[in-house]
Image (spheres, rainbow, N blue to C red):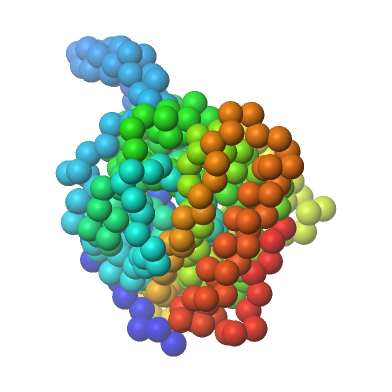
Amino acid sequence: MPCFKQPKHFQSLIILHWPLCYLVIFWIMNPLFIYLLFTSLWPLPILYFVWYILDWKTPEQGGRRSAWVRNWSIWTHIRDYFPITIVKTKDLSPEQNYLMGVHPHGLLTYGAFCNFCTEATGFLKIFPGITPHLATLSYFFKIPLIREYLMAKGVCSVSQPAIDYLLSHGTGNLVGIVVGGVGEALQSVPNTTTLIIQKRKGFVRTALQHGTHLVPTFTFGETDVFNQVVFHQDSKMFKFQSWFRHIFGFYFCVFYGRGFPKGSTGLLPYPLPITTVVGEPLPVPKIEKPSQEVVDKYHALYMEALQKLFDQHKTKYGLSETQKLLFL
């Protein structure tokens, strides 16, 4: 059994459940802004609203990253809680742009969050000259203040215009896409390695249109830090989860981990190692309008590279030699 650790700061506990925090802030900030309109502080929401409108397209035009935010000390506490590490298998040339597949989604994507949205694991030292961007739901960039926080961390919208912008402006950009999306979160249970990818080919088409190298990654341990209650597709709870996704953009997952007292159940993740292995870039040609056959070809090559990466490293990071990577 692992030696369970407590988060060193209350802020660490909050950020360990970041999607839930975004929803809470959304439901708090909107009424608060309306309330302030009828107080002596009315200029504040007015000024922010004007800024919000003028700055509307920034999340789709490279964002507004902040080295200061990415280097907050709180990220090192989250890194050490599990701990979280990143492993390089090949250098990435700053003369190229890259489209990176992030696998698996897990429940809260801790590995990608810490490795690509902060400097806690030393990304810029490991990959000098490379600027990482992790793509997430466009919905989050509509939430006041949250959008500023996300852009400061180098997070971008997963929309096509946002990705096209980054891959066509300069070099050394690395755009990470969680290929399995929120649907893969429902597959996140301990000791499983199931990826939703067989029909997810849009990222390959985008890479071909820009001549951008594809980079496979796999985060070992991502699905082990929580237990999840999985509901049958005919159940009322699964229908509620689907409705929730339709409204908010992601699933309402029922999960649990450890509590504060040793041996108790709660909502803290289990402090188990999370390791993101960044694979070798897969060069692709630049084709403005790639045919479906070409897309299928490079999609297959990408899955082969991902399978190879998984098989080469699985025993190093807690999996058995017989563990299979399942593509759905």
How many numbered markers are drawn? 0
Whole-percent x and y of residue 35? 33, 19
Q: Residue at x 66, y 74 (%)?
A: 324
Whether residue 151 sits left or right of residue 286 in the image: it is left
Whether residue 67 sits left or right of residue 273 in the image: it is left
Vertical side of 207 occupied by 236: above or below: below
Q: Nearest the camera: 177 or 307?
A: 307
Q: Quadrant of residue 258?
A: bottom left
Q: Nearest the camera: 172 or 156?
A: 172
Q: Residue at x 54, y 36 (%)?
A: 286
Q: Nearest the camera: 160 or 104?
A: 160
Q: Quadrant of the C terminus?
A: bottom right
Q: Residue at x 17, y 44 (%)?
A: 68
Vertical side of 103 occupied by 33: above or below: above
Whole-percent x and y of residue 69? 22, 44
Residue 231 visible: yes
Vertical side of 320 occupied by 86: above or below: above
Q: Quadrant of the N terminus?
A: bottom left
Whether residue 147 sits left or right of residue 306 in the image: it is left
Whole-percent x and y of residue 288? 58, 29
Residue extending farthest to the bottom is: 1
Residue 257 visible: no
